[in-house]
Image: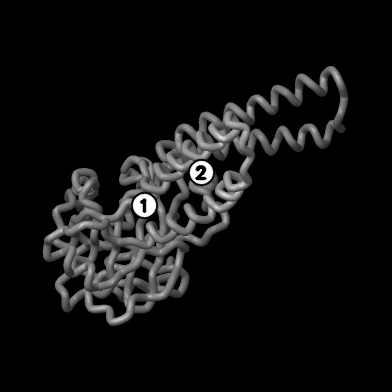
Amino acid sequence: MPSSPNSSENVGFVQLHRPGRVTVVLAIVVLISIIGSYFALMLQGIMSWYVLGIFVALPLVLLIFDSISRKRLLPRGKQKTELTTQLKQLKVRWLLRNSGSGVRRWNRIERGLPRTIVDSSLKEQINKVSIPDGLVEPEKIHTSKPGSLLGCIVGVGFSALLIWAIFFVTLRVPIMGSTIKWLIIAVLLWNIIQLILGLPVVHRSRNLPPFLRAVGRRRFLSRPIVVGPGWVKFSNIVLRADRDMFFIRRTGFRLASSELDCMFVGPSSRRRMTFSGVGDEDFQLLFGAWNVEDVRVEFIDSELS
């Protein structure tokens, strides 16, 4: 299938809100302040229950703050461009869950908005993603819940340490049955395999066997998404490029090569999903199919979908 680097007018770039960063910074600052004040009171011989109360209330306050922050589409401040003005008037809110209701008074076409909006920090990487020039055959793709290198190192190290400890202890003191011991070891080995396969660099390629990709993407039991020329089908819900929009943003401190937070929006439905960076081949298939010039809705009811 012929394709070309992304130069489509269907794609617009603007600074989108990146959730998670402020929450992490606030959590660290507040936690250090509470610990510091607690020890200061202890040194003065003053016992106060307010510190314990703050420890209990802090997670709830931060959770509420983070939830509100994640719903924002555009960052605070004045971005004086026609595109950002139109987006503000469209009143799109980001989803916290995977699915939600559509946007009332939807008028993307009337406002002349592109079908895809991408965070401006991703412009260089997104422009390298190819958009097919010809007919796009419907294909099944899977979203991803990508892991992190730090989480993988810590998790694998901890699991390996527990396996070693079980072998070492049971050799000296038979405190558990053979069946229970091997069952625990099997669970820990499965956790190691899942953590390694969960790294974006491992499972982003479609050349990896489907079973291993499903394990790494944490989508072993989930239904695939069907993408076609200018449309995306979630079970019985169809979103179309000639009517709806596709938003792509970054989250927290994660790199563009590690995780993308995406959302489809239309008048009847919203669907949110994550992928393992711009290099995720499932994401590239989705991006290319959505931004083809010819929207071919006659393929929606194909055998694959």
Q: Secondary structure at mark 2?
A: helix
Residue closest to the eye, 271 or 210:
271
Which mark is on residue 281?
none
Residue drawn at x 18%, y 55% as measured from the top left: 13
Q: Secondary structure at mark 1?
A: loop
Residue drawn at x 17%, y 50% as measured from the top left: 4
- Tell me if I can see residue 197 in this picture: yes
Q: Position of residue 99 (x, y in %)?
A: 45, 67
Q: Amino acid at mark 1?
A: Pro
Residue drawn at x 21%, y 45% as measured from the top left: 128
**Left or right: 122 as drawn, with respect to 272:** left
Residue closest to the eye, 125 or 5:
125
State the residue lying farthest toward the bottom: 105
Q: Position of residue 287 (x, y in %)?
A: 29, 56
| Up-down relation of residue 291 to residue 58 (above or below) | below
The residue singled out by tag 1 in the image is 19
State the residue lying farthest toward the top: 172
- Label 1 vs label 2, nearer the camera: 1
Q: Position of residue 281 (x, y in %)?
A: 35, 47
Which mark is on residue 216?
2
**Left or right: 301 as drawn, with respect to 92:** right
Residue closest to the eye, 12 or 81:
81
Q: Position of residue 162 (x, y in %)?
A: 69, 28
